[in-house]
Structures are given as structure tokens and as C-alpha cells.
Amino acid sequence: MRPAFVAVVALLLALAIACGGGGGNGGDDGGGTLPTATITLVDAAGKRAELTVELARTAAERSRGLMFREELAEERGMLFVHQGETKGGFWMKDTKIALSIAFIAGDGTILETQDMEPLSKALHRPVRTYRWALEVNQGWFERHGLGSGDRVEIPADVTAE
């Protein structure tokens, strides 16, 4: 019976190592685990900017967002996908990256953008209801000449769960 016990312990240890135990936040920084899509933002003059976004489609994914991340690549972001119009707000309590957010109407029009400071409890919400919210590194919208009234092309298969 003792050899069987040793084999079980060895198997459990191997599984623990393979699963990557440890790490300050449970070994899960939330990065790279969500599906991605490519969206295109278009300004009033027709200039286009592509962005690869992680899709936060469930309530749990939207709640976690980009919390605990140390960085976000320049041409990456997170798209918060809702089933319908919403007026929910965003805060940065556990988010370490300075971000900008665009609130996007159901027809793809950017309603407004706001800058959000790391680790802040300030609530960010738009004046009007929105369908999608897009978080990127702070200043990304300005660097690409994008803002209210510009458009976001989101693939039709990007839906909330």
C-alpha cells in the first residue's frame, strides 16, 4: 500500500507544478485567458486604426476587467460586451494601469471617452446608455485622433454570454 501512496503523492505534486501554483495573486493575472477579436476604429475623415481586444463577455469577466495587470501592450485593449444597453460604471480600485475608456453605442458610435487613474475608486460612467466599453492604455484615443462621434467596427460574432 505504501508504494501506491507514494505514486499518488508524486502524481499530485506533478499536477501542482504543471498547473503553476504560487504567484502573488493565485498565479492568475487574468492575461491571455479571454478570447480576442480585432476591432477597427474609424475617425470622421475615414482614417482607420485596428486594435486587438480581449473580450469580457460574462458578468464575471466584466467585473474583473484588467484588474491586477502590470501592463497592457500598446495596440491591445479590452472590450466589455453587454447583451443590451447599460449605464453601469467602471472604477479602477484594483487596476494598476492608467487607462482610457470609450463608451460605445449600439450602432458603434463612440459616445464619449474618459481617462481613468490607477487604483482609484472614482466611478466612471457616461451620460447616456451604452452597449460596449473599450479600455486601452491612457492616451491611446488621443494618439490616434479618436473621440466622440467616431465609429467602432465590431465583428458581428462578438456577443455577450
Image (tube, grey):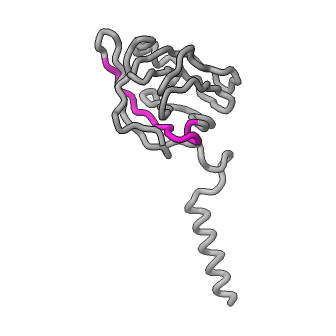
Picture mark count: 0
Of residues 125 and 6, the one nearer the viewer is 125
**Left or right, 94 with reference to 147:** right
> How far across and down, in percent of the image, does residue 95 sit?
63, 31
> How far across and down, in percent of the image, does residue 20 sit?
59, 56
> How far across and down, in percent of the image, does residue 61 sit?
55, 40
- Tell me where the magenta segment starts and ends, as one range: 48-62
- Whether residue 78 is visible here, answered yes or no, is no
Please report the residue visible at 45 percent of the width from the left and 11 percent of the height from the top.
Answer: 148
- Whether residue 45 is visible here, answered yes or no, is yes
Question: Up-down: is 78 above or below 16?
Answer: above
Please report the residue visible at 49 percent of the width from the left and 39 percent of the height from the top.
Answer: 57
Judged from this view, the residue extending furthest toward the front is 84
Please report the residue visible at 50 percent of the width from the left and 37 percent of the height from the top.
Answer: 56
Judged from this view, the residue extending furthest toward the left is 46
Of residues 72 and 100, the one nearer the viewer is 100
Of residues 124 and 115, the one nearer the viewer is 124
State which quadrant residue 152 falls in.
top left
Question: Up-down: is 127 above or below 96?
Answer: above
Question: Up-down: is 66 above or below 111?
Answer: below
**Left or right, 155 with reference to 120:** left
The N terminus lies in quadrant: bottom right
